[in-house]
Amino acid sequence: TRRVVVISESWIFAGDVTTEGDRMLLDRVVHVGKWTGGQWFAGMISDPTKNVELRRMDERLEVPVRAVLYSVVVSDDWGL
């Protein structure tokens, strides 16, 4: 399941999520650098091609589950 994940310190990533113990693992990761143009978070989720700066990451991202503030299920190709 692909999700946009907001973690502590306001970092935002999207990736294919699996969980192992106390770690959330993200593959096919993109980092949401910023979004502009007056969009709210919901606007960014619905259209990642509009005024959103995405940076593709080659590595798997591991995040402690306790650091996750919230996550939103998105389409399998979100941000790619």
Image: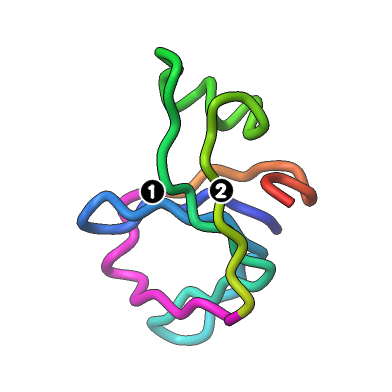
User: Dot 2: what SS?
Assistant: strand
Measure the alpha-carbon separation of dots 1 and 2: 19 Å
Q: Is residue 68 magenta?
A: yes
**What residue sits 52% from the left and 85% below the top?**
20
Question: Pointer 2: what residue?
Answer: 54
- 36 lies left or right of 50: left
- The circle drawn on residue 70 is 1
Q: Residue furthest left?
A: 9
* Relative depth, front residue between 51 and 25: 51
Q: How many callouts does the rendering have?
A: 2
Q: Quadrant of residue 67?
A: bottom left
- 47 lies left or right of 8: right
**What residue sits 67% from the left and 46% below the top?**
79
- The circle drawn on residue 12 is none
Q: Where is residue 45 shown, x and y percent of the image? A: 57, 32
Task: Identify the amino acid type marked 2.
Answer: Leu
Q: Residue furthest top?
A: 38
Q: Is residue 72 magenta?
A: no
Q: Where is residue 49 shown, x and y percent of the image? A: 67, 31
Q: Is residue 80 above or below residue 37?
A: below
Q: Where is residue 47 shown, x and y percent of the image? A: 65, 26
Question: Callout 2 environment at 10 Å: few (<14), some (14 to 19), or many (20+)?
Answer: some
Magenta segment range?
59-70
Task: Identify the amino acid type marked 1.
Answer: Tyr
Q: Is residue 28 above or below residue 74?
A: below
Question: Callout 1 environment at 10 Å: few (<14), some (14 to 19), or many (20+)?
Answer: few
